[in-house]
Image: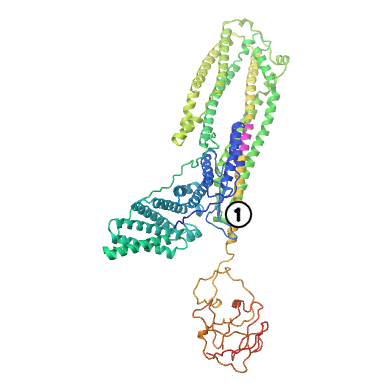
Amino acid sequence: MATFISVPLKKSSEVDLVKPLSKFVTATYPAGEEQGEYIRAVEELNKLRKNALGRPLDKHESSLEILLRYYDQLCAVEPKFPFSENQLCLTFTWKDAFDKGSLFGGSVKLALASLGYEKTCVLFNAAALASQIASEQNLDSDEGLKAAARYYQLASGAFGHIKDTVLSALNREPTMDISPETVGTLSLIMLAQAQEVFFLKATSDKMKDAVIAKLANQAADFYGDAFKQCQYKENLPKYFYFQEVLPVLAAKHCIMQANAELHQSVMAKQKKRFGEEIARLQHAAELVKTVASRYDEYVSVKDLSDKINRALTAAKKDNDFIYHDRVPEVKDLEHIGKAALVKATAITPPLSQKFTDLFEKMVPMAVQQSMSVYSQRKAETVNRLVGTMREATNLCNGVLASLNLPAALEDLSGDSIPQSIAEKARGIVQQGGLQSIEQLIRDLPELLTRNREILDESLKMLDDEETTDSELRAKFNQRWNRTPSGDLYKPLRAEGANFRSVLDKAVQADQVVRERYNMHGDMIALLCKPENELIAAIPSANPAKTLQGSEVVNVLRSQLTQLDEVKKEREGLEVEIKSVAFDMTTSFLTALAQDGAINEEQLSLGQLDQSYGAYNQSVQASLRRQEELLGQVQTSHQEFSSLKQSNSEANDREEVLKKLASAHDSYVEISNNLREGTKFYNDLTEILLKFQNKCSDIVFARKTERDELLKELQQSIAREPSAPSFSVPAYQSNPAPTAAGPTPAPRTVFQPQQAPAKPQPPARPPPPSFSPQAAPTTPSIPPANAPPTGNPPPVAPPSQAQGPPYPTYQGYPGYYQMPMGYNPYAYGQYNMPYMPYQGTPGQGGYPGAPQAGQPYPGYPQQPPQQQPYYPQQ
């Protein structure tokens, strides 16, 4: 009776996890010990997959442990890598577990770029292997019963988990073996078998009959539910559905119900209900008889049947001679209770007892994404504060340059270079002068062109693959059932459009820098000249020595000194702002663990306000201080200008000094802008190369998927008939056979047309066989001129037709037994010798036959013997 259903494993194609995952690790994490550790973990993950899926697994707990450990690792690694069709694209190919395939088409398989699909198939294999291990347990031992029940419940839980998650994990129609209907049915079957194991355990432990009856009735109920599920069309593959599952489930349902009735009859006997005992035993006997007559090849019930019949015989004997209790109808019997002691195991990773996360130190992608957004927010905050201070400094320098300060205070003699101008000229020369700026300006177009070429090549790869996909979709229509490339590439195209917009803005910024350089280029060149040439280029003016030591000059110098202090404070403040660091990883991990999601905006803004709030107040105080000092400087400068002698020469000299001071400030700003632009283009090149690699990877994965799909389509097309079937006219079809039996399948869809053949005689009738009892008692004497023949004496025909039916013809004098090996279908098609044929009056012989009464050539002749003559009908 111990026949249990197990599930075959799915087979997977080999997948290289090392290359794509290592590339992601290298692109995401900086070179160092952490990166090396992650790459080694990737190699271990690849080895784990090969051990779990790349070889046949024994029906042992150690093999199941490997599968569960790989499944746990997939669950742990899923949130840490961006597995998707348009990011980290890994295509997993699995064959249908129940499909045996065909000669030309092979077995059904499905390839998807989805880690959820890989998890589903691995869990299916774990459940299938658990069912196989359970079926191999020794059910005569207590340990074997416990292990079988545990594994069946694990299998039931795994199949149930797949039923609940497979559609959301795949986002498309799955293969038949992992469809919700199939795995739901398998889950019910495993649960029923687990309940049966508990029934066997209770029977082995000789528990009370009331308990055993309830356990058996519950098992019968589970088997009945599974049987009903199996009756839905296409719920299970045909070979699995018709040949194995359905008969076993029907038999098990009857057997468990019979066991329940048997043990309940014992309870009835104990309660002196002898009629009920007989009724239940009769019902049990009928159930077992049904199993023996219909499902004997699947389940043996001889022992159970003998046990029930013995109990029934004894009960009837006692009732007939002693008790005379009325035997009720089965429908009037009290229903047997149920006791479900099994429950599908909840699938909550980790399932493996020896699981250790290979990527334990790697943060989940949700945290990585939150960290990326936080870094952007932090950079924006720093840039805003630093930019505000730099704008204020540039404003201050511009105001002072327009007032010719501090050069006006240093140029009271009117014929020498002011100290500030001389220092600015030396600073420009030390920074490389015009040559450094011109070199940076010449490098920018080359950097821009390189970035544009990378971007254009990346987008061209997407365009080419999308064009090919569209052409194949138009060619195959509904059969081209994969995600359209246009939909898949939308995020990448949006990213590419963003890069192009950034490049366009960078070009505009480069143009502004060039215009500013062209505006101040002459004065910058003047500052780069030797001191004697610079003195000669500055106009002379009448001395204003009378202003030296005056109060207004001292006040102006004091105010300019305070402005310089404000600028130096900003430089220190800028360094402090840029050096602020705070690791938000812990905060994001805590939020993810507590809430299951990360409110990045709230956490980031709170931390940024805490970190940069004090610096923001310092920047605002610096701006207010500068504004106050500039107002004082402008007031003092007006008073200073009113005291100076005003003439054309002095005005020209002051104008040149203003331009030189402004040229120095422009040189510093242009140099900074060009260096920032160069760094921007170089950094953008790295980002674009990553973008190019991303596009290349997804295009390669799509091409691989396209080739696989094309191969499957070619195989499916090869399996289709080359022409539609058509009906043959009735007069061309052969007469239907009269003998009952299955109709053989046609060898081809339609018969090829052949050239008209020569006229053939009618089909030769087979000789009927005669038994000796049916032969006449007095044989007839043939005529003296009867030709000798080598045929044995005829026998009477059997009572039932043997072999295919043959047409009969009136007027044949008799039939002769054919020799062994005669094939009536080959008549006239091969070079075979003909049997002797007795002509009928009025009917000619076959074409090419010898004269009447002469034997056909090729058969060995036997001595003549007498043959009975049968008169014509």
Q: Is residue 332 visible?
A: no
For the N terminus, the quadrant is bottom left
Residue wearing tag 1:
710
Please name the residue shown 34% across and 64% down the image.
Answer: 313
Left or right: where does residue 454 sit relative to residue 743? right
Crowd rating for badge 1 (residues with CA inside 10 Å; few <14, some 14–19, many 20+): some
Q: Residue furthest bottom?
A: 784
The magenta span reads 682-690
Q: Position of residue 638 (x, y in %)?
A: 56, 12
Q: On the picture, is 176 further left or further right than 508? A: left
Left or right: 188 in relation to 74: left
20 relative to 758, above or below: above
The amino acid beneath tag 1 is Leu
Viewer-nearest residue: 312 or 614: 312
For mark 1, give the secondary structure: helix
At x 57%, y 53%, the residue is: 473
Does residue 100 show up magenta in the picture? Answer: no
Indicate the quadrant where residue 862 lies. Answer: bottom right
Residue 537, image x, y percentages: 70, 16
| Residue 433 at x, y percent in the picture | 69, 22
* Residue 558 in view in this figure: yes
Is the residue 33 above or below the residue 270 in the image? above
- Predominant secondary structure, magenta span: helix
